[in-house]
Every structure is written in C-alpha cells, then in structure tokens.
Amino acid sequence: MNTKLDTDYWENRYIENTSKWDLGEVSPPIRSYIDMIENKELKILIPGGGNSYEAEYLYHQGFKNTWVIDLAPTPLANLLKRVPDFPPEQLIKGDFFNLNDSFDLIIEQTFFCALHPKLRENYVHKMHDLLHPNGKLAGLLFNVPLNIDKPPFGGSEEVYRSLFLPFFNIEEMSVTANSIASRKGRELFFQFVKKA
C-alpha cells in the first residue's frame, strides 16, 4: 500500500495530469449546496483543494473569505491563473494537518478519499478542531469500495457514520441525485455540524 502520499506524489499527479477524479469544474452537488448558502461572510476552507473549482465558484459567487490548502503548488497556481484576483494569501501551500486557524464551513471534495485510510481518524479530529462552534463540514464522500493501494480510497455510509458521529451531528447523508454520470449512485452528499 502506498503510504507516501506526500508533496512530490501530488505535485507529480498534477504536472502529469493523472488525477482522474478531477472533474474540470465544480461538482453539481456542491454547486447546488453553495447556491443555497446566503451568508457571504462565512470563512470557508477547501482542504486538499487541488485545482479548486469549488473555490473559484465560491469566489465568483461573492464568498471572498474562501481559503484553500494543498500540499502541491501546481494546482494553487492553476487557480490563480483562472482567477487572477483571488487573494494569494488565502492559498496555503502546506499540510492540512498542520493548519492552525478556524472556519465557519469546510467543504469536502475528494480530499478525504485522497488520504491514506490510516489518517481518517486524524482527519475527523482535525476537522472538529478547525471549525468554529456549530461550524459545518459539508460535501461529498465516495459510497463505494475503491482502491486499496492508491487514492482514491472509498468507503460506505456505515463506516462514515461510525467515524464522524462522536464529533459531529449528522444533518444529512444521502446518495446524491445530481452527480455526474460516471459517479451516479456512488456519491454521498453530507452536512455535519460540529458537536461542542
């Protein structure tokens, strides 16, 4: 099993364009979710943001306090090429697990499935730490067994509930109705609220 999912690993995937789950646009379920958010002042994080189509969409919808963190510099540079006025100080090249900040909302889009499964409990703890009281973690999780030796790694609703329930109230977790064709029936949209 490849446990060395480090900066070089991810940077090479972006340089070689081998991140096959990169849609080239914001995913429809996340776009629909963003369209329902009324408070444009929210401080939002997209961890492991990759090419950050979600950040681009948020920024163009008026969510100017959107932040992205990624290990690899290339996808962050790609976002700046597409959105030159995106504040560069809100693009963090670094390790999510070393981030010290707090947010109202964290959007999950393929970051969880990119992490080695041994890091999943760490992910849950870190998400809880990064959110303000009553902060939300929302987005998509794969609802299928995927790879066991390289990302993307999959999972199931049952596994996710057992991981998150000690730290989050589960407001919603259901198979998405508006996934792209290749992911139909394979994605769960979720909204979790941080427990005190």
Image (cartoon, rainbow, N blue to C red):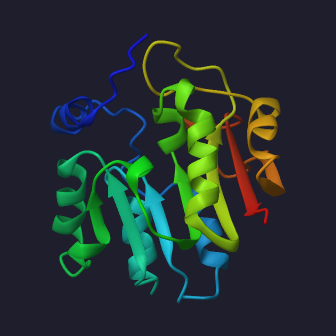
Picture quadrant where residue 181 is located: top right
Q: Position of residue 35 (x, y in %)?
A: 61, 76
The answer to which quarter of the image holds residue 81 is bottom left
Percent of width and height locating residue 2: 38, 15
Question: Residue at horizontal 28%, vertical 46%?
Answer: 71
Q: Is residue 85 above or below residue 129?
A: below
**Residue drawn at x 56%, y 43% as measured from the top left:** 123
Judge left or right: residue 142 versus residue 66: right
Side of 138 where 114 appears, left or right: left
**Is residue 2 placed above or below 21 in the rendered structure?**
above
Q: 118 or 36: which is nearer to us?
A: 118
Q: Quarter holding the C terminus?
A: bottom right
Q: Is residue 106 visible?
A: yes
- Whether residue 180 is visible to the viewer of this picture, yes or no, is no
How far across and how far down the image is residue 78, in percent? Answer: 20, 57
Find residue 95 and report its horizontal and vertical position in percent.
34, 48
Position of 191 relative to 42 (above/below): above
Quick one: 12 or 104, which is closer to the camera? 104
Q: Quadrant of residue 28?
A: bottom right
In the rendered image, which quarter contains the N terminus?
top left
Placement of 124 over or under 184, stated as above or below = below
Q: Please give the count of numbered marks on the rendered protein.
A: 0
Q: Residue at x 40, y 58 (%)?
A: 99
Residue 166 placement, left or right of 89: right
- At a point 52% along the width and 50% down the height, the residue shown is 109
